[in-house]
Amino acid sequence: MSALRSTAAARPLPRTGRPGATPAPRPTLTALPGGATERGARSRLELVRAPLHARSRVPFLVVCMSVLGLALLCALLVNTTMAQNSYEMSGLRREVGQVEQDTQRLQALVRDQEAALHDTARRYGMVESPAPGMIRLADGAVVLGAEEGAGQ
């Protein structure tokens, strides 16, 4: 029922003239020169070309190519720098390994010399002291190990 009401409300009401009023006469239509009758039987709609764009795409392409070129150049620069740093790092690792080997060799030599110190001292005629002492450099006095402040 509501559908009937909505369609009835959507329809326009018929025009009724005022009682006693007569409609005004319409002017007659005349063809203007250059109209459809002179052009032949062609349709009134014709294909029209779009206006040419005033802006060129060349600057945009130049900017895009420049950005692309800079990105490639930056990637090449970063790659080259990383390769150079890698070579330097491998050289430094090799050097660190050599220093570690030298350090181990020298530490082994010191351990061997410490073990042979007692025998080398006896060969030179030295004997072990029962009470070791130290010489104070300030006044040249001999300080025994049992004395107070000997380690200072």
Image (spheres, rainbow, N blue to C red):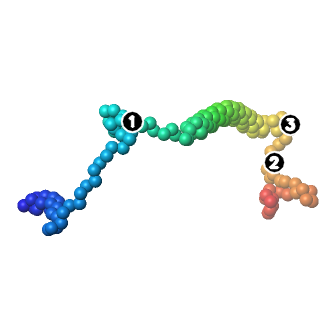
The quarter holding residue 4 reads bottom left
Image position of 64 (left or right of 113): left
Please state, as top left, top right, bottom left or bottom right, where the N terminus lies in the image.
bottom left
Mark 3 element type: loop
The residue positioned 15% from the left and 63% from the top of the image is 16
Label 2: how many Cα within 10 Å (few below 14, some 14–19, many 20+): few
Residue farthest toward the left in the current orientation of the protein: 1
Q: Is tag 3's residue or tag 1's residue first in the polypeptide sequence? A: 1
Q: Is tag 1's residue or tag 2's residue first in the polypeptide sequence? A: 1
The residue positioned 39% from the left and 36% from the top of the image is 47
Q: Amino acid at mark 3?
A: Tyr
Q: Which residue is denoted by mark 1 in the rendering? A: 47
Q: Which residue is denoted by mark 2 in the rendering? A: 129
Which percent across, then down, holds residue 106?
Answer: 74, 35
Please state, as top left, top right, bottom left or bottom right, where the C terminus lies in the image.
bottom right
Label 1: how many Cα within 10 Å (few below 14, some 14–19, many 20+): few
Q: Which residue is denoted by mark 3 in the rendering? A: 124
Mark 2 element type: loop
Q: Nearer the viewer, residue 97 or 50?
A: 50
Label 3: how many Cα within 10 Å (few below 14, some 14–19, many 20+): few
Q: Nearer the viewer, residue 20 or 80?
A: 20
The quarter holding residue 151 reads bottom right
Q: Is residue 19 visible?
A: yes
Which percent across, then down, holds residue 71?
Answer: 59, 37
Q: Nearer the viewer, residue 35 or 83?
A: 35
Which percent across, then down, holds residue 126?
Answer: 85, 41
Q: Amino acid at mark 2?
A: Ser
